[in-house]
Image (cartoon, helix red, strand yellow):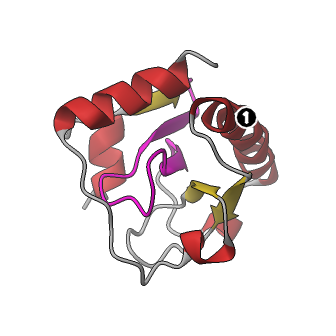
Amino acid sequence: MPSIFTKIVNGEIPSYKIYEDENYLAFLDVFPLVEGHTLLIPKQETDYIFDLDDELLSGLTLVSKKVAKAIAKAIPCKRIGTAVIGLEVPHAHLHLIPINKMDDMNFNNKKQQFTKEEFTATAEKIRQFL
């Protein structure tokens, strides 16, 4: 059964896309810790990030750098934190999270709620820096 991320890749579920190429897709997390919290995935459905072949894994890192720099220009923050947890969806993914303090990346924090218009505006703001 395809993961929810594969359904997003296939256009079956809408998303707030930030970046897309033939191998990768970045989109806003709809349950974000902070504004600009982005998920970056390989389009190839692989459960565990370290099961990706070397080329796909290294490409994920290079794309994450590009997307992280765009997020940092769009969302005021000290850094872009990264996390690989991989338990919530069985599809390799990288969290890119604007942070100002360590606690901003605590996944036990209450998730932020934004309107469709706010998500759309945030995605557009980030895309303008790619």
Quadrant housing the C terminus: top right
Residue shown at the point (63%, 19%) measured from the top left = 129
- The answer to whether one can see residue 15 in this image is no
Q: Mark 1 falls on what kind of element?
A: helix
Residue 97 percent location from the top left of the image: 58, 55
Residue shown at the point (42%, 21%) measured from the top left = 124
Residue 84 percent location from the top left of the image: 62, 69
- Is 107 part of what is drawn in magenta? no
Residue shown at the point (51%, 72%) measured from the top left = 86
Check the image and report above or below for 12 versus 126: below
- Out of 77 and 83, give the one closest to the viewer: 77
Residue segment shown in magenta: 21-44
- Out of 90 and 128, give the one closest to the viewer: 128
**Mark 1 burial class by Cα count in 10 Å: few <14, some 14-19, many 20+:** some
User: In the visual, does 27 lie left or right of 92?
Assistant: left
Residue 83 percent location from the top left of the image: 63, 67
User: In the visual, does 87 lie left or right of 106?
Assistant: left
The kind of residue on which mark 1 rests is Lys
- The answer to whether one can see residue 116 in this image is yes
- Out of 45 and 32, give the one closest to the viewer: 32
Read off the residue under disc 1. 69
Quarter of the image holding residue 108?
Answer: bottom left
Check the image and report above or below for 55 versus 106: above
User: In the visual, does 99 lie left or right of 120?
Assistant: right
